[in-house]
């Protein structure tokens, strides 16, 4: 088994699905499909089954829209104003005003890929026919995605409970031809971009504005992108750990399969097996198998499988939660069409609440903190040269004293780990009520997601520093070679980071190795191992 985190290669997904178009057909979206849309690699279209179920639920809304009975979000106000009735002639204004008033986000704009993923997940949720919107609503979202029109959405403002209201409201403003977007690589108005692309701005009918902003789509989008990053982080961490064993002239005895089967933890078993496979064929390991006075290696080496494996198991849980959300409807109220004759039920509930995502997203950052933390400890061990049996010079310097070597790279790793420690404080455990108390327990899932994505970026830099140090350490033992898998990783690194022969700024090297991690080069170097 290769880590419980499955591969997420968009090109492979597209090949397996014919044209690669994402078809919204009332079924769950694949994580890889959302990644494809987010990165502009795949188009979106609305399937016939989706149109049918949307028309059925819309008929229910049309049937109750003008009734004397109050129906939340259809002929009433919102939040704590839900007891205020709205007359039939004002229903269009009600929905337009909702979208405008809720577009209250602040801060730096979200990256394009996040907004596109959010729009894809929103469209998928609405297409399942439980929100009561007309097909034209979903078709307009798809048209904007396919045309490359991306709303400019401020990153801050959602408490992750009654949906990601503010961010989604900025998207909804663009759908009605208001607000700012990027189009053709430039900023412009939504109205101008839609006009240029032949897309008609939406005129919102009853319930549709609420359906557009009432969902967990921002935190789910961040979760999708995070899952891809976690996969790359784990693969790089395993490669770095394997390389550090031989760089430190450590032992592989703790990787014995029987040890890890005795623990019964799948991530641990998988990590141990993969590290051992990367070291297969090492000439360094047998070179000190005899007359080595050391009995045990430090925890950062000896417990790597337990620590990285625990994080990998956590990430598998995170991915499973995100994937379930990609089949969810997180609107309120929900519309159940029944027999499809226009008679059905409208149920006000709380599927918009973000806690099912907020908790795993918070957990992800805790897992990330340990991958970074144990990586930094291995870097410290190699650079310290405390262990004379490692045969390493202090700071891996070509000439200690005259050259400081990689001394300060460890400082950087320590600083990054310190920030991750702060980010690992859960966002979901503290609460601030909203909407005059009617919304009195919020998830803050978007903060959990943003912190996890910041943490994984920092952790990639920490692991990159370990890779640089371990590659230098491996060369201290030449002409002996490490395992075949480790040597493939070493060769990949050396294409962008030369051997340290005298002091130079490490910053460009660190950035280059992070590029290898994000570009899947490290992952490819370990493929098949």
Image (cartoon, rainbow, N blue to C red):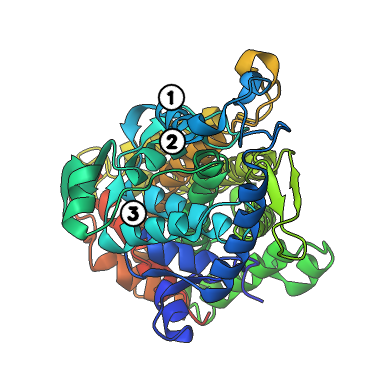
**How many numbered dots are placed on residues in this image?**
3
First of labels 1, 2 by sequence position: 1
Check disc 2: other Cα within 10 Å, few if <14, some if 14-19, many if 20+: many
- Extreme top residue here? 436
Secondary structure under tag 3 reads: helix
Can residue 348 be seen here? The reply is yes
Judging by the rendered image, the residue that carries numbered circle 2 is 169
Can residue 482 be seen here? The reply is no
Decide: marks 1, 2 in contact (CB < 8 A)? yes
State the separation of the CA atoms marked 3 and 2. 35 Å
Residue at x-position 55% and y-position 31%: 421
Residue 495 vs residue 300: left or right?
left
| Quarter of the image with the N terminus in it | bottom right
Of 107 and 151, the residue lying toward us: 151
State the separation of the CA atoms marked 1 and 3. 41 Å
Q: Which quarter of the figure has residue 216?
A: top right
Residue 377 location in percent, x, y?
52, 43
Check disc 3: other Cα within 10 Å, few if <14, some if 14-19, many if 20+: many
Of 45 and 153, the residue lying toward us: 45
Q: Give the label, 1 or 3, closer to the camera.
A: 1
Residue 99 location in percent, x, y?
44, 33
First of labels 1, 3 by sequence position: 1
What mark, if any, has residue 514 been given in the picture?
3
State the separation of the CA atoms marked 1 and 2. 8 Å
Residue at x-position 53% and y-position 64%: 31
């Amino acid at each position: 088994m290769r880590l419980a985190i499955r591969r997420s290669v968009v090109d492979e997904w597209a090949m397996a699905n014919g044209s690669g178009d994402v078809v919204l057909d009332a079924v769950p979206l694949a994580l890889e499909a959302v990644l494809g849309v987010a990165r502009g690699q795949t188009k979106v279209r609305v399937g016939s089954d989706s149109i049918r179920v949307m028309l059925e639920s819309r008929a229910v809304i049309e049937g109750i829209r003008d009734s004397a009975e109050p129906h939340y979000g259809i002929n009433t106000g919102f939040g704590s104003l839900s007891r205020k009735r709205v007359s039939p002639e004002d229903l269009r204004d009600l929905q337009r005003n909702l979208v405008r008033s809720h577009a209250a986000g602040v801060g730096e704009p979200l990256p394009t890929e996040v907004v596109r993923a959010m729009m894809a997940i929103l469209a998928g949720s609405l297409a399942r026919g439980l929100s009561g919107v007309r097909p034209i609503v979903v078709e307009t979202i798809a048209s904007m995605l396919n045309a490359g029109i991306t709303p400019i959405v401020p990153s801050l403002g959602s408490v992750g409970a009654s949906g990601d209201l503010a961010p989604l409201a900025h998207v909804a403003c663009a759908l009605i031809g208001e607000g700012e977007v990027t189009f053709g690589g430039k900023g412009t108005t939504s109205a101008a971009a839609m006009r240029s692309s032949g897309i008609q701005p939406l005129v919102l009918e009853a319930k549709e504005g609420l359906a557009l902003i009432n969902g967990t789509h921002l935190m789910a989008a961040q979760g999708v992108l995070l899952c891809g990053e976690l996969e790359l982080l784990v693969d790089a961490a395993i490669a770095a750990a394997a390389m550090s064993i031989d760089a430190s002239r450590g032992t592989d005895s703790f990787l014995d399969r029987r040890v890890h089967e005795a623990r019964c933890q799948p991530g641990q078993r998988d990590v141990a097996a993969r590290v051992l496979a990367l070291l297969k064929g090492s000439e360094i390991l047998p070179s000190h198998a005899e007359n080595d006075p050391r009995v045990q290696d430090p925890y950062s080496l000896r417990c790597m499988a337990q620590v990285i494996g625990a994080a990998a198991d956590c990430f598998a849980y995170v991915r499973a939660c995100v994937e379930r959300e990609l089949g969810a409807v997180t609107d309120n109220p929900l519309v159940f069409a029944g027999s499809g004759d226009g008679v059905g039920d409208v149920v006000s509930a709380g599927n918009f609440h973000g806690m099912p995502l907020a908790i795993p997203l918070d957990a992800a950052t805790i897992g990330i903190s340990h991958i970074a933390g144990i990586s930094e400890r291995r870097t410290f061990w190699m650079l310290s040269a405390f262990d004379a049996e490692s045969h390493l010079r202090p700071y891996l310097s070509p000439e200690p004293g005259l050259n400081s070597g990689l001394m300060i790279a460890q400082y950087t790793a320590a600083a990054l780990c310190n920030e991750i420690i702060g980010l690992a404080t859960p966002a979901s455990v503290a609460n601030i009520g909203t909407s005059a108390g009617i919304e009195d327990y919020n998830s803050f899932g978007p903060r959990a997601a943003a912190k996890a994505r910041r943490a994984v970026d920092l952790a990639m830099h920490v692991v990159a520093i370990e890779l640089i140090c371990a590659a230098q350490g491996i060369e201290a033992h030449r002409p002996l070679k490490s395992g075949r898998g480790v040597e493939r990783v070493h060769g990949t690194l050396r294409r962008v980071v030369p051997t340290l022969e005298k002091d130079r700024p490490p910053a460009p090297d660190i950035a280059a190795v992070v590029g290898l991690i994000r570009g899947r080069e490290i992952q490819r170097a370990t493929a098949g191992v």
